[in-house]
Image (cartoon, helix red, strand yellow):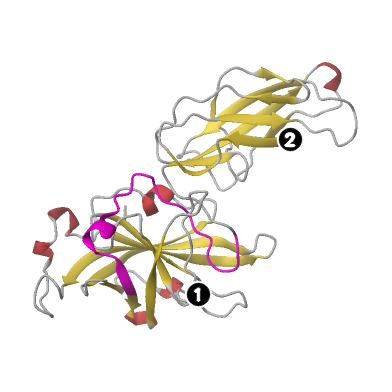
Amino acid sequence: MATASSPTGFNLAPGVTASDHVTVQDPAGSGTPQGTIAFFLCGPTQVTAGGCAAGSPVGAVKTLIGGAATSDPTAGTTALGTYCWRAAYTPGGASVGIFDTAGHTNTGSECFAVGVPGPPAAGRGLNLPMPPPDFVPAAAVRGDAPVQISIPVLGIDAPVENLGLLQNGAMAVPQAVSDAGWLGSGTAPGSVGNAVIAGHLDDATGQPAAFWRLGRLRSGDTVIVTTAGGAQLRFVVVRIARYDRQAVPLVAVFGPSKQPNLNLLTCAGPYLHDHRTYRDRLVVYTRLVDVEPTVRGRPGDRLALESIPSASRRPTAAN
């Protein structure tokens, strides 16, 4: 079956309605397929790396016309996260005994994301997920943009580029493999919410890039971000997780939080030559624990945790 969700892509506005279109193909030349299609939709809590295994029925069962059928539209999809369709074909008429009953789900053409980012164009190096559309661009207003990230235990000290979104709603990637990149339309490091900084694992020749050693981090390790204003923000690693690239928990990484978090992203796992990217994504969840300002106070003055909003004080677990 050939299938396509409408709309598709990422960063769609909450409340969007969607439909699925299916064409039953006949490679054996047995005539135009006849029968019915039942449509199902998996929400963010039901989607797996393979797409939609079950899902909830959407609208009426549709009779194939010319071998194709389109679902009724969904109700407004308001929960942030990834949605995927599943189509179930039952042969009818002259197709009985010729075509088999079949189910189909496709993470490429039958999935879409509401309020969260998705992967940009593939290429050797990083293939990122995407951020929600309700991000507060605090850094652009307050001058909190990060310019440098240091991870002393790994010997990482990289410039930070200010990244935007691609046309399909995906987070762009750093232009230089030696740089990290911050999602500038999102939360600024040090602000309440999930700030996101990503970096390449390697370059086109397989040589180490900015976040080559990121997977060696452990809980309790320190990450230091320097802002354009000269402040140094100290974060502590609270959790490290690895996900299939099609099953990154986008809301946990990019969505809202009551804590000042910084999430670091890079690639992991085996390299998939057919897809020109790595199979997995590594996410390092960190929490702000200390600020050393150089603009609001004298150089070297430190802001204790009591100076950070109360919701930000305890780095206990990542959201």
Q: Is residue 69 above or below residue 81?
A: above
Quarter assignment of residue 55: top right
The answer to whether residue 260 is seen in the rendering is: no
Quarter assignment of residue 51: top right
Helix, strand or loop at label 2? It is loop
Q: Amino acid at mark 2?
A: Met
Q: Is residue 112 above or below residue 236?
A: above
User: Is 16 in front, or is 59?
Assistant: 16
Instruction: Give the x, y percent position of residue 256.
Output: 31, 48
Q: Amino acid at mark 1?
A: Val
Read off the residue under disc 2: 1
Read off the residue under disc 1: 177
Helix, strand or loop at label 1? It is loop
Instruction: Give the x, y percent position of residue 115.
Output: 41, 42
Instruction: Give the x, y percent position of residue 313.
Output: 16, 59
Q: Write the residue at 55% across / 36% down.
A: 7
Quarter assignment of residue 196: bottom left
Mark 1 or 2, which is nearer the eye?
1
Q: Write the residue at 50% across / 77% down.
A: 209
Magenta span: 122-148
Q: Is residue 234 above or below residue 48?
A: below
Q: Write the residue at 62% across / 67% down.
A: 271
Q: Write the residue at 15% across / 73% down.
A: 293
